Amino acid sequence: EDQVTQSPEALRLQEGESSSLNCSYTVSGLRGLFWYRQDPGKGPEFLFTLYSAGEEKEKERLKATLTKKESFLHITAPKPEDSATYLCAVQTSGAGSYQLTFGKGTKLSVIP
Amino acid sequence: ETGVTQSPTHLIKTRGQQVTLRCSSQSGHNTVSWYQQALGQGPQFIFQYYREEENGRGNFPPRFSGLQFPNYSSELNVNALELDDSALYLCASTSSIQGGSPLHFGNGTRLTVT
């Protein structure tokens, strides 16, 4: 069974204090790893897709990386508006449909 | 470009009742999926629709059913509601049935079962 584990569950940072969120996964065949951001009361907002080990993608203060067992979301000099829950999800091969298995998320709070 | 829209935004039902949730997919997207997100959890895959047929299902009982219409909009129906069905129900659409392009989510319907 595919499993996605995110750590830490919650993270408090001072504005400008860089850090990383972790997503470890156990899947039978990875087709893609996705990062989403979710604000309270809203649906997940797409951030990145990573397909193979060694791949990196960047968007503003966020950088996502992928290895064969885990992915990291690096946040550089965060601002209060980066506060949200960050979700990691995997799509696995063999499934006839496009279904994602999500982790529970990391709740990030950035304090001014 | 219009995103994924869901209605209603909030709903309160009594145990045993039936509910229908609605979703309009993003323009140009022909594949719709439904996810259930309990409080403090990640979304869980319910099922996916493509060309008006269900083509993938997660670990949910048959009382969860759906429809997709020719304009790619979709409905999620839940019969015999249970207290554990209380959750945020998310609809997502994409232009790729197999993957390769991201799922775009709506803001969900918050269902409370009392």
Image: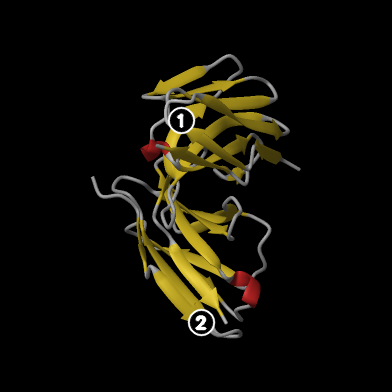
Q: Residues within 10 Å of mark 2 (few under 14, many from 20)?
A: some
Q: Residue at x 59, y 53 (%)?
A: B45
**Which of the 4 quarters of the picture holds residue B24?**
bottom left
Label 2 to label 1: alpha-carbon separation: 36 Å
> Residue A103 vs residue B94: left or right?
right
Q: Secondary structure at mark 2?
A: strand
- Image position of B78 with respect to B99: above or below: below
Residue A93 position (above or below residue A101) = above
Quadrant housing residue A103: top right
Q: Viewer-proximal residue, B62 or B15?
A: B15
Query: Mark number for residue B13?
Result: 2
Which quarter shows the N terminus of chain A?
top right
Residue at image location 58% in from the left, 43% down from the top: A105
State left or right for residue A55 relative to residue A22: left
Q: Is residue B65 visible?
A: yes
**Do circles 2 and 1 both sit on a common chain?**
no
Residue at left 46%, top 67%? B110
Q: Is residue B52 above or below residue A2?
A: below
Q: Amino acid at mark 1?
A: Phe
Residue ID for mark 1: A48
Could you tell whether A91 is left or right of A13 in the image? right
Q: Quadrant of the C terminus of chain A?
A: top left
What amino acid type should be assigned to the residue bearing mark 2? Lys
- Residue furthest left as drawn: B1
* Residue farthest top in this picture: A54
Q: Position of residue A2 (x, y in %)?
A: 72, 40
Q: Residue at x 41, y 54 (%)?
A: A42
- Determine crowd level at label 1: few under 14, some 14-19, many 20+ residues with C-alpha closer than 10 A: many
Residue A100 image point, x, y percent: 58, 43
Describe the element under mark 1 as helix, strand or loop: strand
